[in-house]
Amino acid sequence: MSASRILSADRVIVCDGAMGTMIHSKGVPLGQSFDEVNIDGPAVVEGIHKAYVEAGAEILETNTFGANRIKLENYGLSHKVRELNIAGARIAKRAAGDAAFVAGSVGPTGRLMQPLGPLDFDLAFEVYRDQITALCEGGVDLLIIETIQDLREAKAAMLAAKTVTEVPMICQMSFVQEGKSMMGTGPDTAAVVLSSFGADLVGTNCGTGPQEMLDAVRAMARVTSLGISAQPNAGLPRFFEGRLMYLTTPEYTADFAQRFVEAGAKVVGGCCGTTPEHIKAIAEAVKGLVPVKRAGDGLTRLASRTSVYEIGTGTPVLIGSRLGCPSLSEAAVREGFQAAQDEAERQFEQGARVIALECGADSEKAGAIRRLVELVQSACPGALYLVGSEPGALEAALRAVEGRALVSVSRPVGVVIDSLLPLAKRYGGAVLVRTRADASAQDTPEESLRAARRVIQAAEQLGLEKTGILVEPGSLFTDEGRVNEDTLRALRLLKSDLKVGTAIEHKPGEPTGDVAVAALRRAFESGADVLIADPSSAEVQAALSGP
């Protein structure tokens, strides 16, 4: 059975436990690179792997957690990335035999990502690509990207993996401070972003112990139908006579493994301080258990680094449109981005939970586009709506997104299918589709329905879920300033026939006052889930709060 099949099988899978603390217990000092033991003491590593197999582990993680170029620089070993990772994979494969699968362990670089730190996304991507290439050369069956604190670092690792291999991928974050990562990301946000980005399973490892991890598993299970992995530490470490000691017993850990499964976990194992005795107890505790089946709830979810925003709950979500104008985005770049940061904050305070950013048509200005995205999202907790006329410019913006963005290209449906959907698949975005043939055209409701169906079918063929598609079927007003009844009927058809998320826009120059309020309320009654508009508009505020 392949790793893909076992991860999709209807049963609980047991992963191994700690490697670093086990190596330390064999006498390797804390100041030495544990990854180097793959070369200097392979028998030590292989013995630990074999002990986990005998304990019942079905997945072994390679001893390569810190075997990336940046981490290895601390030990003068950056030139040995390939050697250490290949060795780690082959040692684990020998120990696993036919009894277990081998997962390439990929840990964090230890550096903060820009704009908070020095690590550039492209460099992180290269660092992870080098490591993952070597792990795959060594023969790993799957990858576990783990103990990540920063969503963008997770994305860099996952994107690197997708360019190198097609083996399954588990991505796990660590939550340490009040149930959040060091960057303020909660388990629900992590699950939304990592699921959309292409992980086969999402989960959590390390942290403070099993009790806190149970809350994280429950939060993840609420927002994703993917399988969840849970690998807690054996509690918090204590120093005793110069050695790290973990006090959580195998029995206590095993009890929580059962509770993880009840909460939605599919893969259970251990992290720092856990031993073969912990894994044996876990394997016995979950034997015969079946993962909880969880169906999707049909909601579209966007996210910033710290928050999830749900579309389709019956309450319209407001997208602030004021930075979705080319002239404003260009001005923001000229003025050093502070104007855009201030404007994004202002719109969020006015009720916009998603902020539109115009990315333009010039992909050669990728650096400026990415800088704009980085700084706006560092100033505002809202999710992003990226608008552009060229996919290349949108890709530059998507590489900078921390959470899950909504993207749209002002081009015909064919371009959406050929260019934008693959971008959304690659970078985990949701897509807003304007079904009309061009900006000045107004399709009939039936034409809007056919165009939307065409996009949804193409998206599903790429492996994108329908919840990742929103449809804007046309203008809310006719050229004469009357409510466009065709658009309202299209909204109703899209909901009744396709059950897809829908959007409407109130543009500058369109009717205001009571006419606008009544039209917007009718759009919401007809099924519009999203309103793209100026949050400071009195009409918008009245329509959103009205009866």
Image: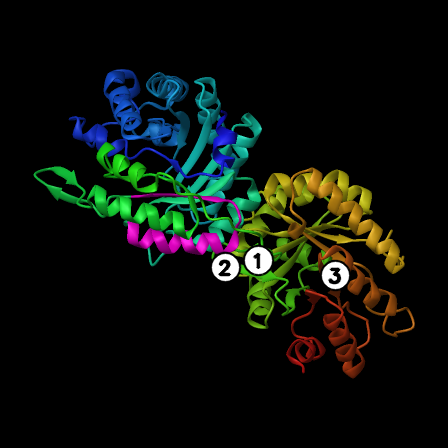
Q: Which residue is mark 1?
A: 383
Q: Quadrant of residue 56?
A: top left
Mark nearer the N terminus (2 vs 3): 2
Q: Main secondary structure of the magenta part?
A: helix
In x, y percent, where is residue 48?
A: 25, 25
| x 37%, y 51%: residue | 182
Res. 336 in view: no
| x 48%, y 28%: residue | 3
The span picked out in magenta is: 210-232
Q: Which residue is mark 3?
A: 495
In x, y percent, where is residue 296?
A: 58, 52
* 2 and 1 marks in contact (CB < 8 Å): yes
Q: Residues within 10 Å of mark 1 (few under 14, many from 20)?
A: many
Mark 1: amino acid = Ala
Q: Marks 2 and 3: which is nearer the front?
A: 3
Whether residue 350 sits left or right of residue 32 in the image: it is right
Q: Quadrant of the C terminus?
A: bottom right
| x 18%, y 43%: residue | 246
